[in-house]
């Protein structure tokens, strides 16, 4: 064991990275990654953000359903761009991929509710190329935004790795 590793192992904490009587944690414990989304605690603020993104997705889905049929083909493109922007913005706002998932879930619920026929026989999304383009295009945008990486690669540090 080198002098540096012996000094850092005994300074302020045990080998498990927990603080000792002096109250300081080891540098290895402080630099540990935060883990996946499922490993992070859900706080009230985070839950409120996801609920807000769900509502935003529902509003974008309802607006897109109305716009895509009214102004074809520009309305379809506008609806798809609005949905993709909401999904990407949700992921960027929260900083996790779950932001895009919450927005996409709201979008999907709204679109599916507006697809169903009413007892009077009214519906907003009928069987046609426009409606299927909106449904499949929106789902493709949601999948892309939920699976693409969110964080840029960290910059190179001045220190050499491994030394």
Image: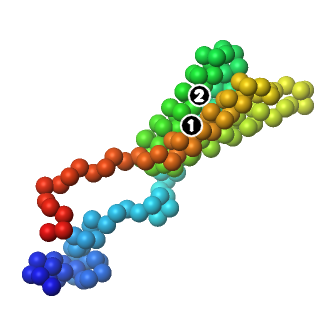
Image side of residue 33 versus residue 76, left or right: left
Residue pictured at 13% horizontal, 55% vertical: 158
Residue pictured at 62% horizontal, 34% vertical: 138
Q: Is residue 80 visible?
A: yes
* Residue 64 position within the rendered picture, expressed as x and y whole percent measured from the top left: 64, 26
* Residue 84 position within the rendered picture, expressed as x and y whole percent measured from the top left: 54, 33
Image: 94 above or below 159: above
Disc 2 crowd, CA 10 A, few/some/many (<14, 14-19, 20+):
many
Give the label on residue 141, or none. Answer: 1
Q: Is residue 49 visible?
A: no
Q: On the image, numbered disc 2 is attached to which residue?
A: 80
* Residue 156 position within the rendered picture, expressed as x and y whole percent measured from the top left: 20, 52
Q: Nearer the viewer, residue 96 or 24?
A: 96
Total number of numbered labels? 2
SS of the residue under disc 2: helix
Give the label on residue 31, or none. Answer: none
Residue pictured at 31% horizontal, 66% vertical: 32
Query: Which quadrant would residue 162 be assigned to in this image?
Result: bottom left
SS of the residue under disc 1: helix
Determine contact: label 1, label 2, CB under 8 Å: yes
Q: CA distance from mark 1 to mark 2?
A: 8 Å
Quadrant where the N terminus is found in the figure: bottom left
Q: Residue furthest bottom?
A: 1
């Amino acid at each position: 064991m080198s002098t540096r590793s012996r000094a850092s192992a005994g300074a302020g904490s045990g080998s498990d990275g927990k603080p000792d009587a002096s109250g300081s944690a080891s540098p290895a414990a402080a630099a540990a990654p935060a883990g996946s989304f499922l490993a992070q605690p859900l706080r009230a603020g985070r839950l409120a953000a996801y609920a807000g993104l769900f509502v935003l997705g529902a509003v974008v889905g309802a607006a897109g359903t109305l716009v895509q049929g009214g102004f074809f083909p520009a309305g379809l493109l506008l609806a798809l761009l609005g949905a993709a922007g909401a999904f990407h913005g949700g992921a960027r706002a929260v900083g996790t991929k779950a932001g895009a998932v919450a927005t996409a879930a709201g979008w999907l619920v709204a679109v599916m509710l507006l697809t169903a026929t009413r007892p009077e026989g009214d519906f907003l999304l009928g069987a046609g190329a426009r409606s299927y383009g909106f449904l499949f295009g929106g789902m493709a945008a949601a999948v892309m935004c939920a699976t693409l990486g969110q964080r840029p690669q960290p910059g190179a540090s001045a220190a050499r790795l491994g030394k």
